[in-house]
Amino acid sequence: MLDLNKIKKAYERVLGVVHRTPFAYAPILSQMSGYEVYLKKENLQRTGAFKLRGAFNKVASLIENGQTGGVVAASAGNHAQGVAFAAKHFNIEATIVMPESTPLTKIQGVKEFGATVILHGSNYDEAYAYAVTFGKEHNYTFVHPFTDEEVMAGQGTVTLEMFEEVDDLDALVVPVGGGGLIAGMSVASRALKPACKIIGVSSAGAPAMKKSYDAKNAIDTTSVRTIADGIAVRDTSPVTLDYILNNVDAFETVCEDEIASAILFLLERQKVLVEGAGAVGVAALLHNKLDLPKGSKVGIVLSGGNIDVTMLSLIIEKGLMKSARKMKLQVILVDKPGALQDFTGILTDIGANIVQIGYDRTSTDLEFGDAHVSVALETKGVEHQELIRQKLTEGGFSFKEAH
């Protein structure tokens, strides 16, 4: 069984290799929530996520036991980079099986550590099944991302660092996918600070562990769909579930819009870049899902920062639209000299900045003599957008908004 001694042993192994990441007070989040909020920035970890802790501890334990053959792992990215890093550190072979949908940045991150990458399956669980088979065929040791005591012990070192810096935390808020992080952290927390509440947070698009927690029995799902690819786990591990049922006080879920808004909030207000999985704890805080007394000291784990830039740009774009800082219009103009100037003049007069414009007079759904203008505007909030609608209507322009 996993215990505090194993976690302390893991900390001895990873010391000097794994970064002791900042555990910093977050004044804006604290003011907004009424809690005293601290952020554990594992997004600044070597390889960009906490997974290095467990992976390195596992590989180090194999080396100590004289197993110097190759290792194989299945991962959407963060565990993969951790295993690849550890294998390179100990100069052993590593093969990583990743889902075919894995972002390019994570694939490249693994290859940079010298590991072989195989893309297989549409999700983690299909990649996992292939990796297990590959390991048996090639006599490689399979390094599981969460159902492994040495891996969980490595993840539990996050708690040790948090308590060393703030020893009177009232609650830990931890992202949950397969459950390895919260299993290790909760075991350490129960041993060191039994009164500290443990709150798990998962994506509503990957609900297996939440459903299992509620039912107190392992329940698998048929599919997952979430921008939080680091916690997109389809099947529940009975091993990690057992630790969660014994140690976790509450379990919340957040939806895709809540995760996206948390990513944007952290980037814009905290100057911190996180991936979807790393944002779920803050998403729960921002959307009032933590049932704690006001003034509680809350430590939230930002588990990783390996977000695909394409996804990030999409989140920023949608966030600007939802917060009324960007507006897209489709306008019908009379196709004659000066019509476009009249339209843009109205926008100029009320301080709407045009960032993109298109002019089409040939579309078959237009009347002869009309033109179709599509325009994207930078705006200054809800009232400014309402003024734009008002002035365009008064100017006789027919328009509709794109969302």
Image (cartoon, rainbow, N blue to C red):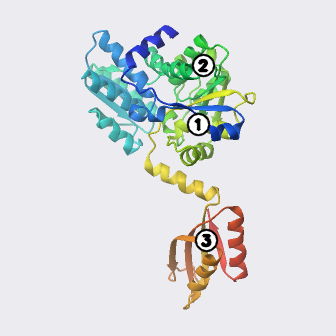
- Taking the image as shown, residue 223 lies to the left or right of residue 154, namely right
Q: Amino acid at mark 1?
A: Val
| In this rendering, the label closer to the viewer, 3 or 1 | 3
Mark 3, residue position:
352
Left or right, 14 with reference to 303: left
Q: Nearer the viewer, mark 2 or mark 3?
A: 2
What's the CA distance linking mark 2 and mark 3? 50 Å
Which residue bears the numbered disc 1? 280
Nearer the N terminus, badge 2 or badge 3? 2
Residue 59, percent from left and from top: 34, 19
- Residue count near mark 2 (Cα–Cα under 10 Å), binned few <14, some 14–19, many ≥20: few
Tag 3 and tag 1, C-beta contact below 8 Å: no
Q: Which residue is mark 2?
A: 167
Q: Secondary structure at mark 2?
A: loop
Within 10 Å of disc 1 (Cα), the crowding (few <14, some 14-19, many 20+) is many
User: What is the spatial separation of the Cα atoms under label 3 and label 1, in whole angstroms?
Assistant: 34 Å
Badge 3, how many Cα within 10 Å: few under 14, some, many 20+? many
Identify residue type, mark 2. Answer: Asp
- Three-letter residue code for mark 3: Ala
63 versus 403 height, above or below = above
